[in-house]
Image: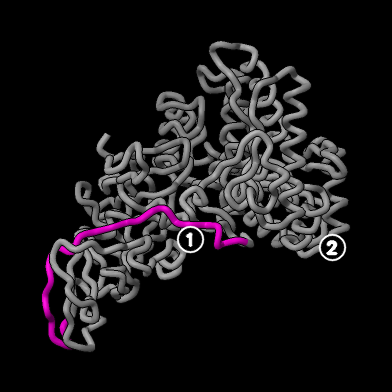
Amino acid sequence: MSENEKATVEGTVEEVIFSNPENGYAVCLVACGDEPVTIVGTLPFLGEGEYIRAAGTWQQHPSFGRQLKVETYEKTLPKDEESIFRYLSSGAVKGVGPVTATRIIEKFGADALDVIEHHPDWLCDIKGVTKKRAEEISECFRSQFGMREVLIFCREFFGAALSVKIYRRYGAGAVDLIRANPYRLCDDVPGVGFDKADRVAMSVGFAPDCDERLEAGVKYVLQQCAFQNGHCYFPARPLAEEAARVLGCTAGAAGEAIRRLVDAGKLTAPEYGEEEAVSLPEYYNAERLITERLAALSQAEPLVRLEGVFTHLALRSHESDERQFAALDRACAALDAAGVRGYRKHACDSIGMVRYPERHMGAVRTGAWLYGVCPYRYEHPERCRPVVTLKARVAQLRTLPAGECVGYDDSHPLSHDARVATLSAGYVDGFPRFNGKGEVCIHGRRAPVLGLVCMDQMMVDVSHVPDVAAGDTAVLMGSQQGASITPQQLAEWAGTICYEIMLSPHARVPVIYEDEETKGKNANAE
């Protein structure tokens, strides 16, 4: 059979070569036909002597040869005495080893498994089996039937490994527990999110507006707010609106679900100003613990001193910014009440500085504005003067005919005979990896980039720029003789933001200061 071909095998498990009890992965030999077949995959609780029907794909292992990678399988209990002995003696049933298995088979023959399941007291006739041990053997055997039921139920919704986790969490009664409330899986079993639990719930008849679904959905929205946006809490009203959008219900119904969860202690909702801040208990408790530890650390001078407390504004709207300012004020008030003193409170970056001049507090974080990049929506761009220039030298010049391709690029042939300058800088130096777009300045004239920017060099068209020679300076970002290439223009060509452009130059690029104290000094050489 060829590799990747679909196949189905069935037969008795001769040997379990390897088994991982944590995730159910196993390697087994199955007797079918003239020679045993090796099967691999998630095969939880599979024991020697069991009869299995497995479907999957053939694969060739470089060390162990042909194997069937199992995708689905079914198994049944052994029926003849030899298979029953191998099953019992394999350790599949706790409390039964080869000696006890032999005695059980000699006493009850092919009815051994029926006796273990329905008449465990009969096992007391076997030498060495007490009543307590007989009950334990029977309980272990019966639990495996429950395990089969769990795996059969779960495989429609989850992978085999996740099904094993569910069985280990709930045991043989898992199916009844899940049918009663599938959403409990979100809290109890790592790896089962709201979407998966919701699919199970819909399949077993839960209504889209049932309390269990709305409550699980609210917690899911809070988790997403934390994972995707870093929010440890969410105001009650916006939370209800977002939950309503996700769950397809009314904001009122979502709000009632929030209230039920708060009343049950499954969410916390302390009042922050004029609104309730709803959070998952683990996040609320973590924030309280951090505050308490900061307060304790601040008293441990000179070992530790709290330098500052800050927030970074999302800058989505004035309303959301005001909520962040209020949250920062409340956090600092809590620190003040705990006796913490001497720290700086700050919130504004470059954009925040121009939007909220009254909120500069104890410090501001001047970022790109420090280099003359105009903050977003600043009303006085004329007050911003870029102070950074990225330069490169012309390494060589060549004249190329029309139709020739430049560098690695073969999709933008020259439309005319061109004088091409090679510059001693590339994308590793921080210039975007343009392909047939972008410009630089040479002799105060703009020169278009040709072809694909290389790692250490790039080519530009200087056909229209007179007197260009090797060693001349090209400005990749900044101004030259009245012409300029701004970070914003580079960002627009590159499809990114100007802050990324400002941070792109590599450490190997010399940084030369032009002030009187450090003029001509390479900061990166220190």
User: Where is residue 436 shown, x and y percent of the image?
Assistant: 30, 76
In the image, taking residue 144 as reference, residue 417 lies left or right, namely: left
**Structural crowding at the residue carrying mark 1, measured as other residues with C-alpha within 10 Å and reported as few (<14), some (14–19) or many (≥20):** some
From the image, tell me which residue sits under label 1.
497
In the image, taking residue 126 as reference, residue 282 lies left or right, namely: right
Query: What segment is highlighted magenta in the picture?
Result: 380-404
Q: Residue at x 61, y 32 (%)?
A: 139
User: Where is residue 499 shown, x and y percent of the image?
Assistant: 47, 55
Residue 149 visible to the viewer: no
Q: Quarter of the image for the N terminus: give it.
A: bottom left
Question: Which residue lies most toward the front here?
Answer: 516
Q: Amino acid at mark 1?
A: Ile
Q: Nearer the viewer, mark 2 or mark 1?
A: 1
Residue 391 falls within the magenta-colored stretch: yes
Q: Nearer the viewer, residue 26 or 110?
A: 26
Q: Residue at x 12, y 67 (%)?
A: 396
Q: Amino acid at mark 2?
A: Thr
Q: Residue at x 76, y 61 (%)?
A: 205
From the image, tell me which residue sits under label 2.
250
Instruction: Please tell me in which quadrant of the rendered image residue 230 appears.
Output: top right
User: Where is residue 188 shown, x and y percent of the image?
Assistant: 65, 40
Q: Nearer the viewer, residue 278 or 41?
A: 278
Q: Nearer the viewer, residue 185 or 44?
A: 185
Residue 272 falls within the magenta-colored stretch: no
What kind of element bears circle 1?
loop
Q: Nearer the viewer, residue 285 or 388?
A: 388
- Tag on residue 255? none
**Structural crowding at the residue carrying mark 2, measured as other residues with C-alpha within 10 Å and reported as few (<14), some (14–19) or many (≥20):** some
Instruction: Please tell me in which quadrant of the rendered image residue 450 appears.
Output: bottom left
Residue 279 visible to the viewer: yes
User: Where is residue 111 shown, x and y percent of the image?
Assistant: 53, 40
